[in-house]
Image (spheres, helix red, strand yellow):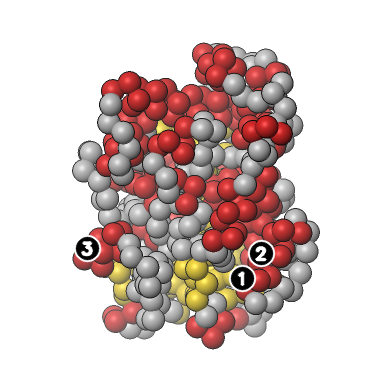
Amino acid sequence: MKDPFVRHPLIACLLPLIFLFAGPATLAQADIIGAQRLVLSSPDLIDDLTPKMQEILTRANGRRDRDLMVRIWYPARAPLDADSRKHYGFHSDAVDFAIDPDGRHDILDKLQNRKRRSNTYQNAIPDTSRALPVILYSHGNGNAAEANEPYFEALVARGYIVVSIGHSYSASLVTLQNGRVAKVDSALQDYVDSEIPEEARDPALTLDQASADALAALPLGAAPRDDLLNRYHYSVADARTGARAQLALWVADIRFVLSALEDINAPGGAEGLSGLFDLSRIGAVGHSFGGAASRHFCDGEPRCKVSINMDGTDPARRGERIRDPHMRYYFDVKAQVAQEVRDGARRDREFLRLVRKLFHQRQVHETHAMIAAADSDLVVLSPRKISHLDFTIGWLNLHRYGPGKRLWQRVIRHTSLPFLDLHLKPDTAGEAPKEICETLEKPRGFRLIYTNLCG
C-alpha cells in the first residue's frame, strides 16, 4: 500500500525537495453503516488528456473507455446480514485486501494477521429517507479505495455520504466489470514520475538551495518575493510533467464520478441509491496524490464547497487559486524520519539532520504558496507522531514510535469533521466555527502551522 512516489527511501525524496504524501482512523459509530461497490465506464473521459496518457490508458484497459470502481459508504437500515460485516480494508470475496495477491508484500502479511472488524455492512439497504451531503474521496497513488474506511465511517456517522474512487491503474487494485482486476500499471507510473531533464531546465527558475533557504526563512503570512514563488512553482509543477498529466486524469475521474452520481441519484437510479445524495453540497477529500486532485477538482466545481488534502504535495502552477475553503494536513517530521530509518535510510547524524531540514522546508515552502493562493478559509496543521504511512491505514499501527493513531483520531474529530460541517451544513454553521477555533487556539495532538479562519 505504500505510495509509489515514496517507495524509495529518503534519498529519492531529497532531490526535488517535494514529494507526494497521505489518510486516518476510527471514530464515532453510526447505528448502521452500509457500503456498495459500483463500476462506472466512460467512452470519452481520456479525450482531453496528453497523447501519451491516452496511449498508456488505452493499452492498459484494452480499449479506449475509462473504467472506474467506486465504493460508497452510507447510512443503512435493517434487515441486516451479520456475515456481511467484514474487516477493515475488505475488498471483495475474491480478493480480501486490495493488494496484488500475486506479489510479495510485508504489509499484506500484517493486514491478514491483524484483521479488525469494521462497523460497515456490505450491500446493506440504503436509508434514503433524506439526502445527505457528499464527500468525494481519492486515495493516494498506489493505494486503495478502501484504505481509510474508519474515516469514512466517521463521516457517515456525522451525516455524510462517502464516495471513494478507485483510480484504475494507479490504485493498488480495483475490481472492474466481470470481476476483471486492474493493478498499478508500471508504464503509467514511469510516465507519472517523468520530469523535465536537469539539463533542459531554466536555471533562472530552478529552486536552488539559496532560494529554498530564503523562502523557508520567511515568516508565514509575510508576502514572499515573486521570484521565490516562481522558482517554487516551476520546480513542483512545471518541471514535473508526468505529475501534471496524472493530476489532469484524476480530476477528470472525479468529475466523471460526480456526473454518474447525478444519474444514480435520479428517480429509478441504480442500486437503490436514488435520492440518497445531496449533490448541491459536495466536499472533496483525499490523501497523497488524491489530496492534490481533490483540491483541484473542488476549485473547478461550483457545487464543491470545501476540500481537505491529507499530506499530498500539490503540483499547482503559479497563478492558480485556492478558491474554496481548504484544510491541509502534513506528516510530523520526527515521525517521518523515524519511518524512513525503519525503511532502511542512512542513520548517520549529519544526513538525518539534513533530511529534517528538507522535510521542514518542504512544509514551509508549500504553506507560503497556499497562503499566497488562498481566496477563502485556510487551515494548515500537522498531527503529532503521524508519518505518511500512518495516514494511510487508519485501523492498524504500522510503526512503534508513539501513540499516533490515538492522537490522529482526536485531531480528526476536532478539526476535519467540524471544518466540513462549517462549509457543508448550514444548520450547524453557528457552532462549527466556535468548535474548530477553540481547537485551533489550544491545539492538542497536532501542531498548528497556519490559519486565517479565526481572525
**Mark 1 → mark 2, Cα distance in angstroms:** 6 Å
Residue 285: % across, % down: 53, 50
Type of amino acid at the residue the image marks with label 1: Ala
Label 2 environment density (alpha carbons within 10 Å; few <14, some 14–19, many ≥20): some
Q: Are marks 1 and 2 in contact (CB under 8 Å)?
A: yes
Quarter that holds the N terminus: bottom left
> Could you tell me which residue is drawn at 51 percent across and 43 percent down?
20
Residue 302 as seen in the image, left or right of residue 435 = right
> Would you say residue 222 is visible in this rendering?
yes
Residue 205: % across, % down: 70, 24
Residue 182: % across, % down: 52, 72
Type of amino acid at the residue the image marks with label 2: Ile
Q: Which of marks 3 and 1 is in front?
A: 1
Q: Which of marks 2 and 3 is in front?
A: 2
The residue to which callout 2 is attached is 56
**Mark 3 → mark 1, Cα distance in angstroms:** 33 Å
> Could you tell me which residue is drawn at 33 percent across and 65 percent down?
104
Determine the secondary structure under disc 2. helix
- Residue 134, located in which quarter of the rendered image? bottom right
Determine the secondary structure under disc 3. loop
The residue to which callout 1 is attached is 60
- Residue 78, located in which quarter of the rendered image? bottom left
Taking 384 as reference, is 54 above or below it?
A: below
119 and 300: which is toward the camera: 300
Type of amino acid at the residue the image marks with label 3: Arg
Label 3 environment density (alpha carbons within 10 Å; few <14, some 14–19, many ≥20): few
455 and 222: which is toward the camera: 222
